[in-house]
Image: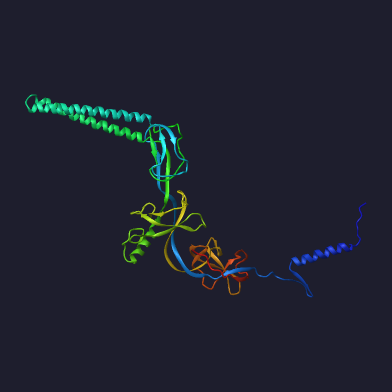
Amino acid sequence: MLSLNTSPPNTSTKRIAAALAAALIASTGCTRSDKGNTFAPPPPPEVIVSKPVERDVTEYLIYSGLVEASETVDLRARVAGFLEKVNFQPGQLVNAGDVLFEIDPRQYKTDVDRARANVLAQKAALSGAENDARLARELADQRAGPEIDAVIKAARRDVAAAEVAKAEAALAEAELNLSYCTITAPTSGRITKNLVDVGNLVGRGEPTLLAQIVQARPAFVTLGVSETDVLNIRRERLLQGGDVAEPGQISPGVWRTCELGLGEGMGYTVPGRIDFVDPKLDTQTGTLSVRTRFENEDGALLPGYFARVRFPMSSRKAMTVPEAALLSDQQGRFAMVVGPKDEVEIKRVEIGELDGDQRVIREGLSPDDRVIVLGVLKARPGSKVTPKTQETAPKGR
């Protein structure tokens, strides 16, 4: 038969219950007083605020493109034959004139010897024809021989001279083909891996591609500048005293400078300049092709890199705030500011260019606004916060 324990709780049980009640009261923020339990709200969260900083900023035109080599040379087999030697390591830096490939030359050496012998034979025939023509002419002049004989032998002499010229041309061609058996570097640069191995037949039917030499010092980036920007730049030049400089120059002989950046956040660390501007606008894209040049002495720029190029245009005073202080939603960019009563407010802003970690603010903020730069996630519009002022210099470049 089931029996129920109705005895009063012991002292240990009472202590555990009292401890649990105290913990529950502490977690709900209630305190005991003579009038009962009251709720103590938590203090407003702390946020770091900073006022917009007015300083000189440079306006830029920014475009993107791909890094291009200054020279890319295809090495091809210009005569047919079996590849005998590869005289480089893939990726090696080669100099102009270095011997890179060698094709079996024996057949072409034989062709040269045959052509040289033919030249000697034709020269001997020419010498005999010249003697015959001279003798026939002397006899004809002395009326000791017919005039027709002198004319025929003079024609034979001229044919022999033409045969000599033909044989010499064949010799030059044979020597040229022999020289094609040795493939040298036409320019300096880094060479790709060999695309054909030793022992393979090359040049049969078409000039076989053997390798490429890529010269990326200097390197180029070709950009498509919009028609609007082109018009603004030309208008600015006209206002400054006339369009006397070449396209792409800020004054006669002085090219407009630019800066190149690779990955996001790496900055624009590579200096360069414009070196070519297309004389006509592309009507299909509405852009003007502009080529920028970077010396690339350290070889850091590899052809094919995606690059961002910016052109410094003008300097002006502007307000800036840290980029991290700005948020965005479907309506655009905004900043969280602390009002006079330490309440959080939203202010919509119109942003400008990014200068280092500082973002230019065109409209929406005043110099006295307290912008939340740290602790944005703790702030809610209309809620109170405890603002702490940040006194640090902005980082720009």
Give the percent coordinates (x, y) of residue 47: 61, 68
Front position in the image: 357 or 208:
208
Q: Where does residue 255 sit, x and y in percent of width and height?
A: 37, 59
Q: Viewer-proximal residue, 142 or 248? A: 142
Residue located 12% across and 25% down the image = 149
Give percent across and percent down for residue 198.
Answer: 45, 33
Q: Residue pushed farthest right? A: 1
Q: Is residue 295 above or below residue 101?
A: below
Q: Say which quarter of the image contains residue 294.
A: bottom left
Q: 251 and 228: which one is in front? A: 251
The residue furthest left is: 143
Q: How is the image coloured?
A: rainbow
Pick the front one: 211 or 99 = 99
Residue 181: quarter of image: top left
Instruction: Answer with left or right where residue 277 lies relative to residue 9.
Output: left
Q: Residue at x 31, y 28 (%)?
A: 114
**189 to the left or right of 327:** left
Compared to 138, does 187 lie above or below? Answer: below
Q: Position of residue 382 (x, y in %)?
A: 61, 69
* Residue 188 in the image: above or below residue 329: above
Residue at image location 92% in from the left, 55% down from the top: 3
Q: So how many labels did they put on this image?
A: 0
